[in-house]
């Protein structure tokens, strides 16, 4: 570890190393970290972009979709030349150009019960960039089981929600504690509900910040809270919620 920050790396990350909450030791933590991003769309793109620029050493990307023309207005790492190509392949190429120091592992498949444990075992931090509640609750379930740190994001219209869960702490609630029942996926469907492009960028950027804070062991202020963004009125608020007695997270 003593030689991990070469002159080249110090120069690359100099603008964040100078922060008192980062420094050389914090940068080493970032470089050693392993982050899995599920979903390479509107949320996943800014998350992957900023984490790779920050120097996260190992990033896994799970997505089985191809780039469509309707993706480009909000999925910031794609352009018109990428249409029809698999997102994970495009992202691996582009991240290598942004930061060749980062190791990228791609999973061109849908995450589900039969493959999630095999994928999860390689990562300490999980970022949800999915567009459906079935996947969000699946990530929630296995993050609890394997005591992962999970950052969940959701966007619709001009609104965003961000949850930060640290399942190393048995007292922390989970996603099921907040939702009494599984909501309809229609509220996350950009095709029907619509989405203003920058909303995805803002929420994904906050998710990236939350991951970096957890890697650096900074503020715990966001634990046990949902951050609700009303970007039409520029209103940000945090709502605290507690662990439910009969929730699935009680069993782990």
Image (tube, rainbow, N blue to C red):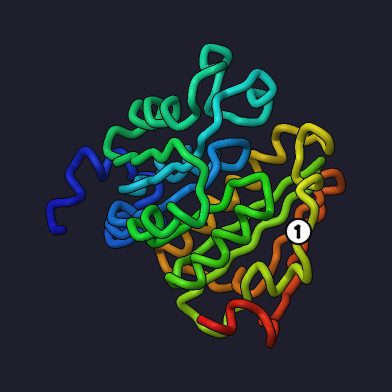
Residue pictured at 54% horizontal, 59% vertical: 139
172 vs 131, left or right, is left
Residue 18 placement (x, y as % from top left):
37, 53
On screen, 163 above or below 197?
below
Question: In the displayed structure, does residue 155 sit left or right of residue 81?
Answer: right
At 33% from the left edge and 45% from the top edge, which residue is drawn?
14
Outermost residue to the top: 81
Q: From this viewpoint, which residue is outermost toward the right? A: 233
Q: Secondary structure at mark 1?
A: strand
Q: Looking at the picture, does residue 90 appear above or below residue 16?
A: above
Looking at the image, which residue is at 41% across and 59% down? 117
Relative placement, left or right, of 76 versus 23 is right
Instruction: Please state the horizontal and vertical placement of residue 172, each as a whole percent of the image.
Output: 58, 79
Q: Residue furthest bottom?
A: 245
Label 1, on which residue? 228
Left or right: 1 as drawn, with respect to 127: left
- Quadrant containing the N terminus is bottom left
Give residue 148's position: percent from left, percent from top: 45, 67
- Crowdedness of circle 1 by 10 Å Cα count: few (<14), some, many (20+)? some
């Amino acid at each position: 570890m003593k030689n991990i920050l070469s002159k080249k790396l110090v120069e690359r990350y100099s603008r964040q190393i100078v922060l008192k909450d980062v420094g050389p030791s914090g940068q080493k933590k970032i470089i050693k970290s392993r982050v899995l991003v599920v979903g390479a769309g509107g949320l996943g793109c800014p998350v992957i972009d900023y984490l790779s620029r920050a120097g996260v050493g190992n990033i896994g990307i799970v997505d089985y979709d191809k780039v469509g023309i309707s993706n480009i207005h909000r999925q910031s790492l794609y352009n018109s030349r990428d249409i029809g190509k698999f997102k994970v392949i495009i992202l691996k190429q582009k991240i290598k150009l942004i930061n060749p120091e980062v190791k990228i592992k791609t999973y061109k498949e849908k995450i589900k019960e039969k493959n999630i444990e095999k994928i999860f075992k390689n990562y300490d931090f999980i970022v949800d960039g999915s567009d459906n509640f079935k996947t969000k609750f699946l990530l929630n379930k296995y993050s609890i089981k394997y005591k992962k740190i999970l950052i969940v994001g959701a966007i619709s219209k001009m609104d965003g929600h961000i949850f930060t869960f640290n399942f190393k702490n048995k007292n922390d609630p989970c996603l099921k504690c907040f939702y009494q029942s599984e909501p309809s996926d229609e509220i996350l469907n950009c095709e029907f509900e619509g989405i203003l492009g920058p909303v995805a960028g803002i929420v994904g950027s906050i998710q990236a910040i939350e991951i970096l804070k957890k890697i650096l062991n900074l503020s715990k202020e966001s634990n046990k809270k949902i951050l609700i963004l009303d970007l039409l009125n520029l209103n940000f608020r945090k709502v605290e919620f507690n662990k439910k007695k009969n929730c699935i997270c009680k069993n782990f």
